[in-house]
C-alpha cells in the first residue's frame, strides 16, 4: 500500500476513533446510571435494594472475563467486527432492562458488561492506527477523559431526569436504541482492508493464547492489576453504585445533592487522569506519582468521613476523583513491564484482573455495609465504617506498589561511553 493510501486510511481511523469515543462514553453512562435509580429498578425487578446491587454488580463478571476476549478479537478480526459486536451486545443489554423480571435484569446487566469490555481496548486499537506514536498517549488520555465524562453524565444528567419523574424504562429504551445505532455506525465507519487482516490474523493463528501466557506469567502484571483494582473499587463500587444511597440514608442529603456529590468523583477523573499522567511523564517515573495519588485518595476519604466540616461533600468527592486518576498509571506500567509483542493483550489482562478485584469486593461490601444501610442507630458511625473499608483497600494497594519495578524512562540513563544503564 502506497503512502497516499496509508494517509487516507489514517484519516478514516481517526474518524472511527471518534465513533469509538461515543461507544466508550455510553459504556460509562450505562455503568453508572443504575446508582440514581435504585428504588425504581428494585421495584421493576421485584428485588430488595441489596438484591438490585447484586444484579448491578454482575456487570463486572462479564466485563472482566470479556476483556480477555476483546483483546483476542481485536487481534484476530480487527476493530470493525469487534466493536460492532460489542456495541450491539451493549444495546441489547439495555433493552433487556425494559422487561420487569429479575432474570431479565441480571441477563441485561451481564450483556452490558460483556459489550462494554470492547469499548476501551477498541478505542486504543483505533487510536494506535490513526495517530502517530508522538500523539498516541494524548489520544488515549483523551479517550479515558471522555469515558469518565460519561460516568459523570450517568449521574449528573440522568439523576435529575429521574428526579423529575421520567420513568427509568424510557431511559433504557432510548439509550439502548441509540447504542445499537452507534454499533451500526462503527460497522460502516471503521475500515476493514486486506492489509489489516493479513497483518492482524495470520501471525496469530498458530498460538491464540500465547500472549496471555506471557503476560500472566509475569508477577508484575498481577501487581499492576491488583493495585488498579483496589484504586478503582472506591469509584466503581462506592461512587457509581452505593454513594447516592449512602449519602441519603447515612448523611441525610436530599436526592439531588446526593446525586451531584456522587457524580463529582467521575468528574474529578476527567482532570485526574491526564494530570497525574502528565506528572509521570514529567518526572519520568511511575511509582512516586502512583503512591502520591493513592495517598491523596486516603486523605480525601479521611476528611470526608471524620472531618466533614472542613470541605463540602461535593469538593471532597471531586478531590477523591482527581486522586483516583492514579488507578490508570498501572495501565502504563503493565505495558512497559511486558514485551512489545504482547502490549495489546496486556490491556485485556489488566482489565481482567482489575475488574476481577471489583467483582470480589462488591458482594463483600454489600454484605458488610449495604444490607445494614438505613437500619443502624448511629448512621454517622456506619458511614465511617463503610468508608474505612475503602481506606484499607487503598492502603493495601500502596503496599503492593512497593513490589512494582519502576518502568519509567527516568530509570535509564547513559554512561560516559554512551551506553544505557539503570539509575
Image (cartoon, rainbow, N blue to C red):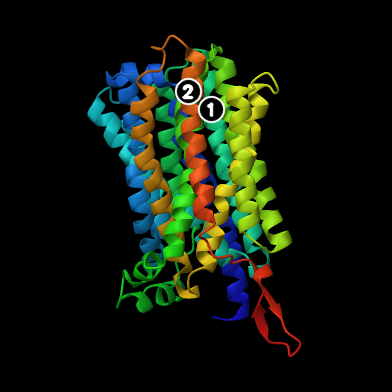
Q: Are marks 2 and 1 in contact (CB under 8 Å)?
A: yes
- The residue at 36%/63% (across/down) is 72
- Identify the element where label 2 is drawn: helix
Counting every numbered tag in the picture gives 2
Q: Nearer the viewer, residue 259 or 325?
A: 325
> Which numbered marker is on residue 297?
none
In the rendered view, tell whether residue 255 sits above or below residue 28: above
Could you give the CA–CA distance between mark 2 and mark 1, rounded to whole angstroms?
A: 6 Å
Task: Give the x, y percent position of residue 346.
Answer: 45, 63
Residue sitting at x 62%, y 79%: 3
Residue 384 in the image: x percent, y percent?
A: 51, 23
Q: Residue furthest bottom?
A: 417
- Kindly tell me whether residue 341 is visible in this rendering: yes
Left or right: 318 as drawn, with respect to 376 = right
Q: Earlier in the sequence, mark 2 or mark 1?
A: 2
| Residue to which mark 2 is pinned | 36
Query: Which picture quadrant has residue 284?
Result: bottom right
Q: Quadrant of residue 156?
A: top right
* Vertical position of residue 60 compared to residue 400: above or below: above
Q: Is residue 212 above or below residue 91?
A: below
- 59 vs 79, left or right, is left
Callout 1 secondary element: helix
Q: Where the N terminus falls, by quadrant?
A: bottom right
- In percent of width and height, residue 234 lies at 50, 36
Mark 2 nearby-residue class (10 Å; few <14, some 14–19, many ≥20) = many
> Which residue is at 36% across, 21% downward?
41
The residue that mark 1 highlights is 155
Q: Is residue 304 left or right of residue 118?
A: right
Q: Which residue is painted at 34% across and 52% down in the image? A: 66
- On the image, the x and y values in percent for residue 129 come to 55, 66
Residue 112 visible in the snapshot:
no
Amino acid at each position: 500500500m502506497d503512502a497516499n493510501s496509508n494517509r487516507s486510511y489514517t484519516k478514516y481511523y481517526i474518524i472511527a476513533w471518534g465513533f469509538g469515543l461515543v461507544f466508550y462514553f455510553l459504556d460509562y453512562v450505562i455503568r453508572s446510571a443504575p446508582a440514581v435509580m435504585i428504588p425504581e429498578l428494585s421495584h421493576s425487578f421485584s428485588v430488595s435494594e441489596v438484591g438490585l446491587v447484586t444484579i448491578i454488580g454482575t456487570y463486572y463478571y462479564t466485563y472482566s472475563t470479556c476483556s480477555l476476549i476483546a483483546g483476542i478479537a481485536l487481534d484476530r478480526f480487527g476493530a470493525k467486527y469487534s466493536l460492532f459486536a460489542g456495541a450491539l451486545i451493549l444495546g441489547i443489554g439495555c433493552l433487556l432492562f425494559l422487561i420487569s423480571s429479575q432474570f431479565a435484569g441480571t441477563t441485561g446487566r451481564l450483556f452490558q458488561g460483556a459489550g462494554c469490555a470492547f469499548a476501551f481496548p477498541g478505542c486504543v486499537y483505533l487510536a494506535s492506527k490513526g495517530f502517530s506514536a508522538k500523539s498516541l498517549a494524548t489520544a488515549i488520555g483523551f479517550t479515558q477523559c471522555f469515558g469518565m465524562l460519561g460516568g459523570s453524565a450517568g449521574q449528573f444528567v440522568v439523576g435529575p431526569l429521574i428526579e423529575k419523574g421520567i420513568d427509568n424504562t424510557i431511559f433504557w429504551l432510548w439509550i439502548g436504541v441509540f447504542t445499537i445505532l452507534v454499533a451500526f455506525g462503527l460497522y460502516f465507519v471503521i475500515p476493514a482492508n486486506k492489509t489489516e487482516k493479513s497483518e492482524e490474523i495470520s501471525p496469530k493463528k498458530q498460538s491464540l493464547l500465547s500472549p496471555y501466557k506471557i503476560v500472566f506469567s509475569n508477577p508484575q502484571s498481577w501487581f499492576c492489576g491488583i493495585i488498579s483494582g483496589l484504586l478503582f473499587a472506591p469509584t466503581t463500587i462506592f461512587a457509581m453504585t452505593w454513594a447516592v444511597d449512602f449519602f441519603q440514608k447515612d448523611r441525610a442529603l436530599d436526592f439531588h445533592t446526593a446525586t451531584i456529590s456522587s457524580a463529582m468523583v467521575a468528574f474529578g477523573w476527567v482532570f485526574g487522569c491526564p494530570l497525574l499522567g502528565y506528572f509521570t511523564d514529567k518526572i519520568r517515573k511511575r511509582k512516586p506519582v502512583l503512591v502520591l495519588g493513592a495517598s491523596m485518595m486516603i486523605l480525601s476519604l479521611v476528611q470526608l468521613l471524620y472531618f466533614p466540616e472542613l470541605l463540602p461533600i461535593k469538593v471532597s468527592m471531586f478531590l477523591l476523583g482527581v486522586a483516583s486518576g492514579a488507578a490508570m498509571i498501572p495501565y502504563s506500567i503493565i505495558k512497559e513491564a511486558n514485551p512489545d509483542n504482547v502490549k495489546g493483550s496486556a490491556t485485556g489482562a489488566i482489565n481482567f484482573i482489575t475488574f476481577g478485584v471489583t467483582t470480589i469486593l462488591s458482594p463483600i461490601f454489600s454484605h458488610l455495609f449495604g444490607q445494614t444501610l438505613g437500619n443502624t442507630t448511629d448512621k454517622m458511625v456506619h458511614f465511617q465504617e463503610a468508608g474505612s473499608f475503602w481506606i484499607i483497600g487503598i492502603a493495601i494497594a500502596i503496599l503492593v506498589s512497593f513490589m512494582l519495578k519502576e518502568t519509567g524512562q527516568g530509570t535509564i540513563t547513559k554512561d560516559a561511553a554512551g551506553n544505557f544503564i539503570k539509575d
